[in-house]
Image: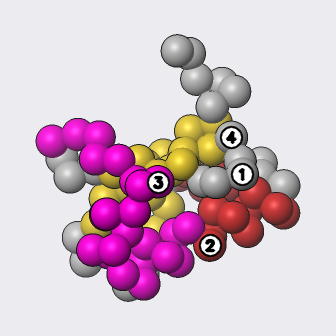
Amino acid sequence: MQIFLSDDALAVEATMNDRDYNKLWDVLEFIAADLEAARTDPRNRFISSRNEWGTHIPGTRYTAFWFANDAIRVTLIADETLTEH
């Protein structure tokens, strides 16, 4: 399954260091390899009525928000240090 990042997600990806970038793609490739397994993985949380999921990227400060139809589409990568709680 292909993986596409929105412009917003690409902007965050461009600021990541190599380690975080590699961890992001490890997670996205895991999701793409077996979507049903990814949906039951404890890292992934269903977050909206639009079938969107949030996945914390282990060992980083990032969470990727995505949905799947004909491909994995990453709508946003949130930097937890910039997110208000």
Q: Position of residue 54 (x, y in %)?
A: 41, 47
Q: Residues within 10 Å of mark 2 (few under 14, many from 20)?
A: few
Residue that numbered label 3 is attached to: 43
Q: Where is 26 relative to 6, above or below?
A: below
Q: Nearer the viewer, residue 77 or 5?
A: 77
Report the residue at 71% width, 48% height from top.
60
The amino acid marked with disc number 4 is Arg
The quadrant of the picture occupied by the N terminus is bottom left
In three-dimensional space, the C-alpha distance between marks 1 and 3, rounded to whole angstroms, equals 12 Å
The amino acid marked with disc number 2 is Asp
The image's mark for residue 59 is: 1
Disc 1 and disc 3 in contact, CB within 8 angstroms? no
Q: Residues within 10 Å of mark 4 (few under 14, many from 20)?
A: few
Q: How many marks?
A: 4
Q: Give the magenta range.
A: 27-49
Residue that numbered label 4 is attached to: 61
Q: Nearer the viewer, residue 7 or 62?
A: 62
Q: Where is 13 relative to 28, above or below?
A: above
The answer to whether residue 3 is seen in the rendering is no
The image's mark for residue 26 is: 2
Q: Position of residue 13 (x, y in %)?
A: 67, 54
